[in-house]
Image: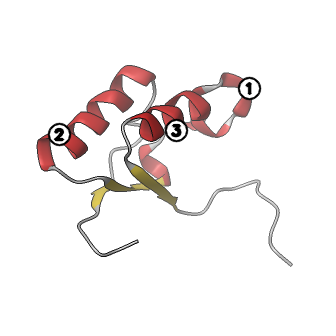
Amino acid sequence: MGGGSIAVLEGAQGAICDLPFARDVIAATAIGVGCHRLAIEKGALAGSFFDLHTGLAGEVLEKFVQYRVQVAIWGIIRGMPAKS
């Protein structure tokens, strides 16, 4: 992968809480800014994103794939086992 711009979404507590808002983020990033890479701070995702029973993570990440936007999520995720 070559260089290029990376859009960043941070500080919007629980902003991505449903599929319509995720599509808005993708549109703003890919179409509005012309950037196909997005780094999302963990805090910008609703808590339900990390509860895999809700299906939110799968739906949201599938949209990023469909619109060819590479995404990275960063931050400390509590409850995850530490690497040894």
Q: Closer to the N terminus: mark 1 or mark 3?
A: 1
How far apart are the alpha carbons under marks 3 and 2? 17 Å
Give the vertical position of 12 relative to 59 (above or below). below
Task: Specify the quadrant of the image occupied by residue 48.
Answer: top right
Q: Amino acid at mark 1?
A: His
- Within 10 Å of the Cα at label 3, are there few (<14), some (14-19), or many (20+) other Cα atoms? some
Q: Which mark is residue 36?
A: none
Residue at the (46%, 50%) spot, across then down: 43
- In screen coordinates, is 32 left or right of 17? left
Give above or below for 33 relative to 21: below
| Residue 48 seen in this snapshot | no
Q: CA distance from mark 1 to mark 2?
A: 31 Å
Q: Earlier in the sequence, mark 1 or mark 2?
A: 2
Q: Residue sitting at 64 percent across and 57 percent down?
A: 77
Q: Work out whether mark 3 precedes mark 2 in sequence or the reverse, and give the earlier one.
A: 2
Instruction: Give the residue at mark 2.
Output: 31
Q: Residue 1: x percent and y percent?
A: 41, 71
User: In this figure, which residue is indicated by the disc labeled 1?
Assistant: 53
Which of discs 1 and 3 lies nearer the camera? The answer is 3
